[in-house]
Amino acid sequence: GQQLNQSPQSMFIQEGEDVSMNCTSSSIFNTWLWYKQDPGEGPVLLIALYKAGELTSNGRLTAQFGITRKDSFLNISASIPSDVGIYFCAGRTGGGADGLTFGKGTHLIIQP
Amino acid sequence: DGGITQSPKYLFRKEGQNVTLSCEQNLNHDAMYWYRQDPGQGLRLIYYSQIVNDFQKGDIAEGYSVSREKKESFPLTVTSAQKNPTAFYLCASRQAAYGYTFGSGTRLTVV
């Protein structure tokens, strides 16, 4: 099946630093989604991207849909303690409700 | 408020038993999904349903079964044929091209 390569696997940063993570795939996706998951909870949608080249912001978060439709990145500016968690990218090929393909996640740890 | 409710939050199963995980949504979404999450892994699709009385296998359907008798409900049964059932199970729903909404999950442990 399709695979998404998400990196880095984990990040240890200082509060206030900017964060960048990305996902790449050998397959083309029509939709890219970025989720955050807290321990023991379901993922919560952060940003949805629907067009190649699209750049979308949500507060301190910015994500882009790559021109090739095979990659996406998520940036977090001026990190704060509540940003801690696991961030997942997910892609959808469209053409039916066939579910999402998820990356393995980026575990963000913030040191005060 | 609209959302997805999964129950129970924690479930323990003896080997050889079937167990059923509940998923209910009041978002009026057409499509519903079940995902499995293991430590250090992304979510993997078990089953999905686009409309009532119809469902399709995902990537890891072996050892699982589902039903979709009502639009609001999509229960997942973990059968004794599932050799490694201990995992975190997530239900999600979707309407048209919008993002998927997830429940808060059920953690299943085999004892």
Image (spheres, rainbow, N blue to C red):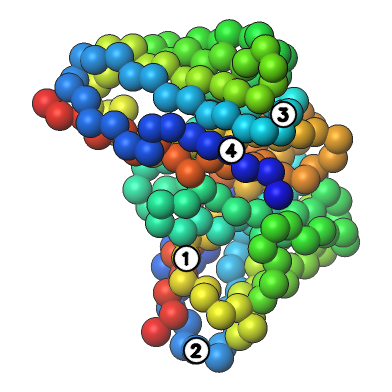
Marks 4 and 2: in contact by CB < 8 Å?
A: no
Q: Residue at x 66, y 25 (%)?
A: A70
Question: Of tags 1 and 3, which is closer to the observer?
Answer: 3
Q: Position of residue A84 (x, y in %)?
A: 29, 33
Label 3: which residue?
A29
Sequence order check, earlier mark of 1 and 2 = 2
Between disc 2 and disc 3, the foreground one is 3
Distance, label 2 to label 3, CA atoms, is: 39 Å
In percent of the image, x 47 and y 65: which residue is there?
Answer: B87
In the shown orientation, is residue B23 left or right of residue B95? left
Q: Label 1 amino acid?
A: Ala
Q: Residue at x 58, y 68 (%)?
A: B21
Work out whether disc 2 and disc 4 sit on a shared chain: no
| Residue B40 in sight | yes
Q: Tell me, yes or no, whether the two marked residues, 4 and 1, touch with CB atoms within 8 Å.
A: no
* Residue pointed to by mark 1: B87
| Circle 4 residue | A4
Q: Do labels 2 and 3 share a chain?
A: no
